[in-house]
Image (cartoon, rainbow, N blue to C red):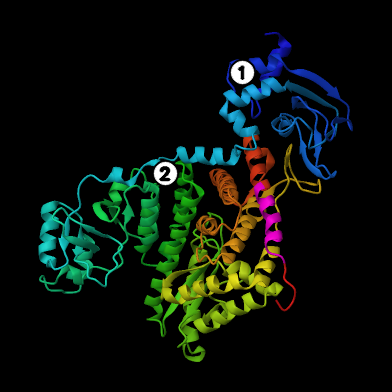
Amino acid sequence: MDVELLEIRQHLGRFPPFETLSDELLDEVASQVEVAYFKADTDILTLDQELHELCYIRSGAVEVYRRGGELYNRRGEGEIFGQFSLLRNNRVRYPVRTMEDSLIYFIPESVFHHLCEVDDDFADFVELSRPRLESVVEEQKKNNDMMITRVRKLVTRYPLMVEASTSVQEAASQITDFQASAVLVLDTPTEDDNPRYSFVDSEERSWQLRGILTDSDFRTRVVAEGLSPDTPVGDVVAGNVIAIQSDESVQEAMLIMLRHNIHHLPVMYRRRPVGIVHLSDIIRYETQSSLYLVSNIYHQPSAEGLARLAPDVRAAFVRMVEEGADSRMLGSALSTIGRSFTRRLLELGEERLGPPPVPYCFMALGSMARNEQSISTDQDNALVLSDDFDPEQHDAYFLALAQFVSDGLDACGYPYCKGDIMATNKSWRQPLSVWKRYFSEWIADPSPERLLHSSIFFDLDAVYGEHVLVEQLQDLVAQQAARHPRFLAAMARNALNRTPPLGFFRTFVMEKDGKHNNSINLKRRGTAPMVDLIRVHALACGSSAQNSFDRLDDIDRTQLLAPGVSDRLRYALEFLSMSRIHHQVIDIQHDQTPDNNIEPENVSSSERHHLKDAFQALSHAQKFLKFRYPMPARGK
């Protein structure tokens, strides 16, 4: 190969979609390239021009325009254009003009189509029918062993099971003989029962899974309570069974353990118990001690002890990312850790202040409520109090409790909310009836201030206390929001306040007006507006889900969006989230405070393309949002 062809080949091989081609394919491309030089402010492609070559920028820069003359993109060295025309009718849809003197490689149409046929990565990059984001996100999942390993692989033997009438002494004896650490408790279903887990055994007897007793339960529920050895185990077990299906992933098993702070998890094949997974079984798949960290949190005797665990949270976060966790897993794990800090602080607060004078529920808002917390987050919380609450008699207690928790969270690495959305604010420390009035007013008359509250408070979940207080608010939102078109229209417009950039150009982020910025806040310009628009669709279809991915599942079931749209949003949100997460890990590894900003010079060529795809998916979804929820006339 002569020097000129070698230089062409080496340059192509540095940039996508050519960087993954085999040597033979690169040789084929380089040998058929035509080279042309264009001065600045020269048209390369004009609207509706016939085109039979893929264009590659060897040097210089170009501007790509829409049909109406609006700037669509700017491209520089190593980028391609013209592929859309080759994939359609060979007519130029996006005119291209040079910004500066430019050297362009023209690759014949026949070579382009051959590469699409023989190389999947090349085809994924250029073909509109094969989304690049989907490919890269799915590839990330393949690299995560926890997501492909089924929990049944961890089951090594059939579980020990006893009838509910068995005495606790006999059950303890069987646990010892079986060398087990837990026993499943079975009961005979009655006609009034509609058990979640019921089955028929080999002798055709009907059973339901009543609960599980662990060796720890025997100490805390039997011995510590001074129960008689003859007490039936059915009187000791809790009624709410937490279990997992055998074909679920190890990741899901870990998330359930994290969410419920448990160390034993019954494994079911359909409705029949087939095993019990213990914490020790999942250790080799668990992504760095997030379970241990949660356990350690609950064993801390003071707020000062909790604060000393803050560095462990970052260490766990980094290792989880390095071991291939996805954004949903990371968000759930970090949210569970945050909830655990909050719950332990509330327990310590009650120990210091005494039992609460009336029932209450501590409510998480925002990312923690959605199970989407990141390593860079502040605290957003509130208190929902029983309607027996009397401010003069009771508020001093709850203010002191809220202050203790808020100060403790700040010491643990969750800074005070700059907008004062915390239970220390009297407005957000109210009885249930007042909260119901708040939400009803926000929905019925969406003023700008109320819309601001809606974007914060409409992601809400119970953390500690009487969960039913918060569940009533969740039900109220799910029932009322969908019936108020004006509220949905206002929320939709509010969700358009933050728009994504156009993409990247050289070492800058390019805005839609052509201006350049040195960095981009991936939360403010990516994940947050994506969460906002998903929330609007979820409210419209009456979903009570809080997590954005769960909301997309509910939206799918209502067919509110066209086929395939929710999938594109799902992949875009995952990629934006993981890009943000990976750059936060880089900050931590360089002893810098992690934030949400990324600089173009720290973004690889392939990541730039994928981020642009995600921004475009977000932009298209925002345009549909305004169309889907028009502002009704007054009085309607």
Taking the spot 14% from the left edge, 70% from the top edge, the residue there is 232
Residue segment shown in magenta: 617-630
Which labelled disc corresponds to residue 147?
2
Q: Which residue is mark 1?
A: 25
Q: Residue furthest top?
A: 2
Q: Is residue 19 visible?
A: no
Q: Is residue 627 magenta?
A: yes
Q: Is residue 443 left or right of residue 285?
A: right
Residue 62 found in image quarter = top right
**Whole-percent x and y of residue 545?**
50, 63
In the depicted structure, whether residue 76 falls above or below residue 339: above
Distance of label 2 from label 1 (alpha carbons): 34 Å
User: Amino acid type of disc 1?
Assistant: Leu
Q: Is residue 171 magenta?
A: no
**Dot 2 or dot 1, earlier in sequence:** 1
In the depicted structure, whether residue 445 falls above or below residue 237: below
Residue 93 found in image quarter = top right
Tags 2 and 1 in contact by the CB under 8 Å rule?
A: no
Which labelled disc corresponds to residue 251?
none
SS type, badge 2: helix
Quadrant the C terminus occupies: bottom right
User: Amino acid type of disc 2?
Assistant: Met
**Whole-percent x and y of residue 392?**
51, 91
Crowd around label 1: few <14 · some 14–19 · many ≥20 (10 Å): some
In this view, the residue in front, 473 or 337, is 473
In this view, the residue in front, 44 or 176, is 44
